[in-house]
Amino acid sequence: MHKCLLTIFLSLFSLHAFAVTVLIDPGHGGDDHGAKGSYTVGSGKKKSKIDIKEKDLTLAIAKKVKELLTPHCHAYLTRSLDNNLSLEKRAEVAETIKADLFVSIHVNSSRSHSAHGFETYYLDNHDDAAVRKVEEVENKISGGAGEEAIIRQILTDLVISRTVTSSKALASSIHGELGKVLPKKFKLTDRGLRPGLFYVLALSKRPAVLLEAGFLSNEKELAKMNSEKFQDEYARAVAEGIKKFIKTRYKSPVSLF
Ligand SMILES: [Zn+2]
């Protein structure tokens, strides 16, 4: 092949990282606000309270991640607007676009206002500890299916068992990048990489992770998370982690065809 044509061919090939499709899922939306929090700015008479909903923070971060990934792979969002989207529908999007990877973005909340830090969950239906997470706010599911039936189904799902290794590797790659930035630049505590049994990840049937950026219930942390600087750096770290995972996982284009 002519040298010039070969260069064009190779650059086109690397541009989309062998056509890996990544679906970024901003948690909640529409009537489902997720967690809510507020922080105070100013002092004296100029003091005012800023109210924040999880659904808005997750969308802002997810859009940035998508933008950063677009030159490197096929990146999509489950929602780009403030609209309702059930957990089942999010999984359906993953199916429709044949996503290779699923990354759900959330913001944490706790009754304790002092709780702080960032966490990364990977889908794992083996660990008993993972089951406890099912009770949390992220697993609100619509429709009539009984919760227990759904849990039983997820725990015995062979597809999930097969994707655990990839989910953990993807989570580890993203968490590693977040760990390079958040503690140093924003003084956020690393709460670790954890197995989790989230419906939205289980339903998506592919390597999947769920990020809890920080605590919305912690005023100081919320103020940081609501800044453009934090969202930019956070999104950059997530995109970097995804890119590194894709590079390692799909280093040989042959493996994809
Ligand atoms: Zn959430």
Image: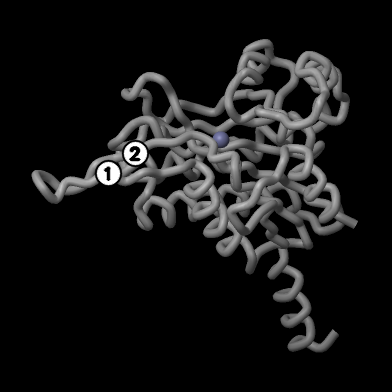
Q: Return the residue at label 2.
A: 38
The picture quadrant where one finds residue 147 is top right
Crowd tier of the residue under label 1, counting other residues whose Cα lies within 10 Å: few below 14, some 14–19, many 20 or above: few
Left or right position of 166 against 36: right
Secondary structure found at label 1: strand
Residue at figure coordinates x 79%, y 50% from the top left: 93
Q: Are marks 2 and 1 in contact (CB under 8 Å)?
A: yes
Q: Amino acid at mark 2?
A: Ser
Asked if ligand 1 lies within 8 A of label 1, the reply is: no
Left or right position of 162 against 169: right
Which coloring applies here?
one colour
Q: Residue furthest top?
A: 128
Image position, residue 18 (x, y; %): 78, 62
Q: Return the residue at label 1.
A: 49
The picture quadrant where one finds residue 8 is bottom right
Task: Give above or below for 233 relative to 87.
Answer: below
Image position, residue 65 (x, y; %): 56, 56
Residue at figure coordinates x 54%, y 36% from the top left: 34
